[in-house]
Amino acid sequence: ILASRHHLDTNHHVNNARYVEMAREFLPEGISVKELRVEYKKAAVLGDYMIPRVSRTEDGYVTALCGSQGAPYAVVWLRE
């Protein structure tokens, strides 16, 4: 995922809500999210490339949006 202008907030960082939207794009169709939690690790800026790493858990999914070196920008837990 390439951080584009429409992802940015007034501080020129990816808006926190956009990380959640990005993470939800990689869930299977029809998933009903009942709870979410996000850990923001590092602000992504225009042109940063994020690689989604999705894992299934007992009660939902975890999506880490990582940079090319593997360090996460954000980790999103989505519980069904």
Image (tube, rainbow, N blue to C red):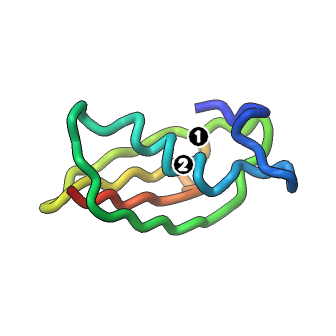
Task: Give the residue number, with chain letter if any, for mark 2.
Answer: 66
Describe the element under mark 2 as helix, strand or loop.
strand
Residue at 58% x, 40% y is 50
Q: Is residue 13 left or right of residue 61?
A: right
Describe the element under mark 1 as helix, strand or loop.
loop
How would you rate the neighbour count of disc 1 (Cα within 10 Å): few for under 14, some for 14-19, many for 20 or more? many
- Above or below, comparing residue 80 to residue 3 in the picture: below
Q: Is residue 79 left or right of residue 59?
A: right
Q: Residue at the far right: name it.
A: 11
Task: Estimate the x, y position of residue 75 in percent, counting from the top left.
Answer: 47, 59
Nearer the observer, 70 or 66: 66
Residue at 32% x, 57% y is 78
Residue at 24% x, 31% y is 29
Q: Amino acid at mark 2?
A: Cys
- Above or below, comparing residue 43 to residue 45 in the picture: below
User: In which quadrant is the C terminus drawn?
Assistant: bottom left
Q: Amino acid at mark 1?
A: Met
Whichever of callouts 1 and 2 sits on the residue coming sooner in the sequence is 1
Task: Give the residue number, with chain letter if any, for mark 1.
Answer: 50
Q: Alpha carbon of mark 1 to alpha carbon of mark 2: how far?
A: 5 Å
Nearer the observer, 47 or 20: 20
- Above or below, comparing residue 8 to residue 30 in the picture: below
- Above or below, comparing residue 22 to residue 29 in the picture: below
